[in-house]
Amino acid sequence: MDSSYQARRGGLLRQPLNSTSHNQTHNLSITLLPEEQEMLRNTSVGALGLQSRLQRSTYNPLQDVSSLSGDTSQMLEDMDDADRGRSKIDALFTQFLEVLQAHNNDNETLDVVQQLAQACSQVVEQLELEMQRGVGGSQGAKQREQSIQWLKQEINTWRLLHALYYDRLLLQNDQQADEDMQDGPMLGGSEKEVIQQLYAINAPLREYQLVVDWLEKSYDQHQHQSMALQSHDRMMAWENTLFQLENMQGAAFGRRGDDICKQLDPDAPVREKQPLHALDMEDNARLSRAIFAAIRSGHIEDALKLCKHYGQTWRAAILEGWRLHEDPNYEQHGSSLTGGGHEKLPIEGNPRRDVWKRCAWLLADSKKYDEYTRATAGIFCGHLGALQTLLQGSWQDLLWAYIKVQIDIRVESEIRGCCLKRYQPMPDEYWNGKMTLEQIFDELHVAKDVGVRDYAQGQLGVIQQHLILDTCGELLQHMCRWLDKEQGQLQPHQLRFMAHIVLFMRQIGRIEQTAQQQLAERIIAAYVEALIQREQPTEIAYYSAGLSNKLQVQLYSKFLSQLENKRERELALDAALQAGLDVEQITRHTVETIRLASTPPTALGAPLAGEVSASDRRKIQSLEYLTHLMEQRGELVWQANAMMRHYLASQKLECVRLAFAMVPHDLINQLIKIYGSLDNLPAREECSLKEYLCYNVYLMGINSFNEWTRLQQTQPQPPQQSGQKLGQENFTERMNAEHKEQTYRSELARWQQKLKEQSKATTDALFNVLLFPEKGWLNDPFVSKPPENAASLHWEHRQLQLEKLRSICLPEVALLLHEVLLKSGDYAGCVRLADEIADERRQLYKVYTKHKLAELLAKIADASLLLLNNKLDPWGYPITA
């Protein structure tokens, strides 16, 4: 149907005709003789070009597409096999992101859809080129073919979406269209003028036409092979029948004259109930099929050229009868010649279109004609039954037939209601065929053909249906049901397709309700989950930025948790910053998740004492995330302290050292740079800083004690005495022995000096732990009130941990200090240790249990006995009379 809106139908897709029930009985392929091939090569270029475009294939591509939509997951599993075109199709992840980043303006939303379709088209071209070159062998060709089928269906959907929402977002909001709508229908105009106005003001009818255009355009893209038609420069209709009638004696063509019709007018075979010559019948069937294919693909003019080229001009005349009538020589109200000119302009369309349409209905309803001829007439007269008989095996073809009929009914109703003319009545069955889109899709859902039902209920069919119906909420529900049903088994490219549809809908404002927003976020989050498996930080960060803060943190933290390489972590954090994610919250959540994760048992069992397990190393290295931003120094020391508390309680001193080393040595200077001065530190940072300094003092004390122990174990040994008696050695042996003795004494003196110095350093280091300033070791400084987020920080739980560590570590430090003092001969210092424990300022005695306190007092008592043996009192003072 011509209309002013047809100029806007470029760039849409079409779907193939499917007639599996007739392909076997109407296989019209033939083999040409050499002279016929030469004649075919000499045929005009225009006719051959037309012929190659329109001839119908006996192959049914929708068989594969139906199975594709019914079980897309199985198909896409093969698509993702390595070295089978995977790299080409996986490039779409990055290309889609680049398209979105290049068009971030709301006014460019429709341009984004076109670019997405173009990206898919480029991949299809690359895969087809690889197939032509034989890349990957037969298995690779098979999988590339599956990828191409999926991508072509995706391209179809993108172009459908663009066509529909171009009209919905731009044309339907046009103020001029609203004003025209207020004027009401045009009365008394020509048929063409009435329908032009109808298309201008009737948005649903325009959408019907857009869907038809889309289905017609997509049909052209699935022509796999040409069906040969006999062709030469001067075609004559039914030439074999004419030849036989002119030579009645000849029987070489398989039929005698009395077996065929006697006249050659177009109605003769039906009127006489006699067939044409067998070859002419075959040509007729092939031509009817080609004409229908041309009309199905929207190329009516090409169908007319085919009719004329093959000498059946009456077919061309019949196909012209549907055109709307308009006499350009009269104004709208039909009184005067246009412009007062003397030249009469030709009349457009069919003045007796109503009669032609009634006849076309009778032809489509008749059983005397072949199914393609009936279906061709049914297209222009709204006869659904004639189309259903032929198109029953394809969802796309049936949808095209249904909507084509609905357009015809609505156009005819408008013409008969607005034009001042008496029309031949159409049968009641014609008017009873009016349906809504919802009713059409309900019919397709319960179609008899399994392939139609599978496609209608499959993912592609459901998506296309709801795009046509503009029911975004129901589409989101279906997508979420697929996510629940598949339990994370949907292929990444399915999720990519679904997620970008959701992003488009959200950008144009179709997702407004809270429930719909939650469904949309679930779909985008599922796509981000798929991207996490690919470990592409830029894509993950970009799509995560479109989610709520809670989902952003969960998903990006999950991504960071699986990164091991430092460079990869830096790139991931840079991508998060670039996308505007809350990096501070994400990194905090990541470190806490890794830190609190339970360690699974390994086949090798627990590591040896002093060794660091892989799980512990992973937890400690996660602190790298908190070193990326200067602003997170407070969080870094807080998390590092939490790890060190855990490892110290587990007696994993090497893990404590590694965790401590993750904090920069100039932490205090960095905190001063952030907060201005130490007096301005928040309560959490102030307590964390003191706790960190406590671990520093503790590690210095333990390291110093370990060094003292090492020196204790490396005391020089005296040289061995020779076996000869004194005075019997020769001069050389005596000089050698004296040299060894002298060397031993000098080494022993150096060792004793080092040990003395180390003993003093160790004693000071351990005393620094016991005598830590302010309120003591691992006691928080005074803060006016706990932090505001004390509950989320588990502040009270931390206090209990600190108290427990004091009760574990301080008694051990006191014992180590006593051992150093005792072995250094400072017995009085051992006794004075009791004074420090009993000092009320620090109240160190409170961290002792009765058992540990008794153990320490027993050791101090031993030191007092040694003092008494040295003629001193029990406290180390000289005894005075």
Image: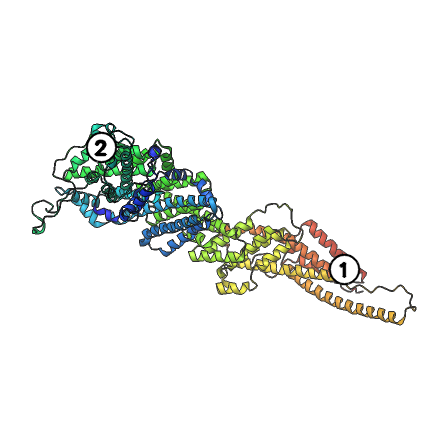
Q: Amino acid at mark 1?
A: Pro
CA–CA distance in space, label 2 to label 1: 146 Å
Q: Amino acid at mark 2?
A: Leu
Decide which of 113, 12 is in the foreground and name it.
Answer: 12
Residue 382 visible in rendering: no
The x and y percentages for residue 215 are 30, 42
The x and y percentages for residue 565 are 54, 56
**Labelled pair 2, 1 in contact (Cβ < 8 Å):** no
Decide which of 33, 503 is in the foreground and name it.
Answer: 33
Q: In the figure, residue 872 lies in which quadrant?
A: bottom right
Depicted 180 relative to depicted 375: above or below: below
Name the element at disc 1: loop
Q: Would you name the residue on which mark 1 appears?
A: 874
Q: Would you name the residue on which mark 2 appears?
A: 245
Relative placement, left or right, of 310 versus 856 is left
The x and y percentages for residue 787 are 49, 54
Q: In the figure, residue 50 lies in which quadrant?
A: top left
Q: In the figure, residue 701 lies in which quadrant?
A: bottom right
Looking at marks 2 and 1 on the same chain, the residue that comes earlier in the sequence is marked by 2
Mark carried by residue 202? none
The x and y percentages for residue 87 are 46, 51
Say which quadrant the C terminus sits in. bottom right
Q: Residues within 10 Å of mark 1 (few under 14, many from 20)?
A: many
